[in-house]
Image: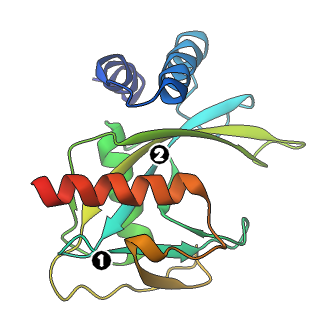
Amino acid sequence: MSLHRDAQAVLAGWVAPTPEEERLREEFLTHLRGHEDAMWRECAPGHLTATTAVLSHDGERVLLTLHPKAGMWLPMGGHCETSDTTLAQVALREATEESGIAGLTLLDGPLALDRHKVWCHPPHSWHLDVEYGAVAPPGAEAVISDESLDLRWFPVEEIPELSDEATRRLARRARSLCRTA
């Protein structure tokens, strides 16, 4: 199965928890139908990306990266690569690469959708972000990659101001799923 078909199947089968995310789900599916290259950075109007909230083993803390371009504390995430075959694989790969933590366990997902303006294609384009959660093994130590200015664990309910509501929502949803797993 191609990554494009996987994304269509994942989004077609996902039950959006809010009306806003249902609107995004439909928008993402329309974008996939209209763009064979919708999974790739080269798709100028916008492209699908995957983000992952990495939680501590007990689900109480979330690992955030101080993103160099956005200047905000955000979850791990990024672009699809040609070697990826599923959105879940993109989410896990990006989380592992950006956190430096081996052995992450991906939670059932997606957990949320978000659409945000980026500058991949000036003056701007869009990331159509499919969001997941993952749990780190006990004792996991993060290692800062060249894609981050800093990495820190924050209590889920104490994500710093220099973040956004999408990050807070994703961390809360991941923690909720972690607690029921």
The furthest residue to the front:
157
Amino acid marked by disc 1: Ile
Give the x, y percent position of residue 82: 44, 41
Image height check: is 81 above or below 60? above
Image height check: is 1 above or below 103? above
The furthest residue to the right:
123
Give the x, y percent position of residue 41: 63, 40
One can see residue 117 in this view: yes
Give the labeled residue for mark 2. 81
Query: How far is the residue under mark 1 from the one under mark 2?
Result: 20 Å
One can see residue 52 in this view: no
Dividing the image into 4 quarters, which one contains the C terminus?
bottom left
Give the labeled residue for mark 1. 101
Mark 1 and mark 2 lie on one chain; the one further toward the N terminus is: 2
Identify the residue shown where x is 50% and y is 80%.
145
In-front residue for pair 82/20 = 20
Amino acid marked by disc 2: Glu
Identify the residue shown where x is 48% and y is 64%.
75
| Disc 2 secondary structure class | loop
